[in-house]
Amino acid sequence: MGFDAGHKSGQPPYESLTVEYECAGIMNKVEVKAWLGFSFLAVAMGLLLFIPAGTIDYWQAWAFLAVYFTGSLFIVLYLVRRDTALLQRRMRGGPAAEKKKEEKMIMLIASLGFIALLVVPALDHRMKWSHIPVSVILLGDILVALWWFIVFIVFRENSFASATIEVAEGQTVVSTGPYAVVRHPMYAGGLLLVVGTPLALASCWGLLAIAAMMPVLIWRLFDEERFLARKLPGYTEYCAGVRWRLIPGVF
């Protein structure tokens, strides 16, 4: 408002506001928020790993972070260029973004579980509880990379893949690509992440966090299916055609 008033009255525009205006022409608010979120997550995950570990001499953590944020960077760049609407939907995540108390609880537990996936292996490294061969560590990094590949496939196929349980205006049932194999490919890919993370961080004890996260994942999955069956036309028929939720032939 200050810039517009000054400009209309013939006053020279403020240099700082001019710079902000020019930057806004290149990168809108959604993109700025995405990059700030990316940076915050990188710092937060680094702190969750290196502070409990008591050292930065933790090459497994550096390798994990490199793999994780290379994938994350690719996804952000893809969404910035191809689907900013989906980028905005994905940023509305976490417990506070959910509408129902039950959903908030699910996401809170899931968030704590993800923190445990980092902190427990870091403590494991500090106390030297586990002895994981390099081949298994590399397998963990591969699983994390595969998770991001599945995320990319899902986002390319489904522009309505929100981080919260909702039905957007104009949303339709997606039954192609990974959705032709399982109903919840993002959750299926998430299994690779929760298994791969502790392995990549050289920790057997970190796998215990999976036991705490799996019931929450299943809870979330059924909650989402009930909501979509009520709100999204054609979803019940889709479920009748695609039997498996997470793992073909198993569940």
Image: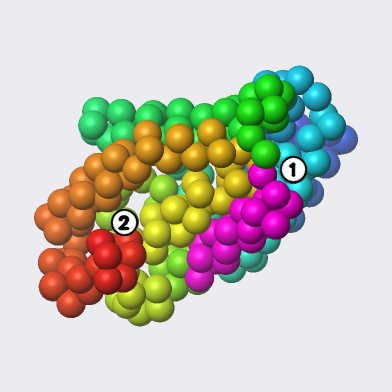
Quarter of the image holding residue 157?
A: bottom left
Q: Residue at x 20, y 55 (%)?
A: 225
Query: The disc labelled 2 sits on which kind of residue?
Result: Ala
Q: Residue 136's x, y, as percent?
A: 65, 54
Residue identifier under label 2? 168
Tag 1's secondary structure?
A: helix
Q: Residue 97's x, y, as percent?
A: 39, 35
Q: What segment carries the magenta color?
A: 132-153
Q: From the viewer's perspective, is 243 left or right of 39?
A: left
Quarter of the image holding residue 104?
A: top left
Relative to 82, does residue 101 appear above or below in the rendering?
above
Mark 1 Cα shell of 10 Å, populated few (<14), some (14-19), many (≥20)? many
Kindly tell me whether residue 179 is visible in this rendering: yes
Relative to 27, does residue 58 appear above or below in the rendering?
above
Q: From the viewer's perspective, is 187 left or right of 171?
A: right
Query: The disc labelled 1 sits on which kind of residue?
Result: Gln
Residue identifier under label 1? 60
First-in-chain label (1 vs 2)? 1
Q: Residue 49's x, y, as percent?
A: 68, 30
Mark 1 and 2 residues: CB-CB less than 8 Å, in contact? no
Q: Residue at x 41, y 68 (%)?
A: 158
Observer-nearest residue: 184 or 127?
127
Kindly tell me whether residue 171 is visible in this rendering: no
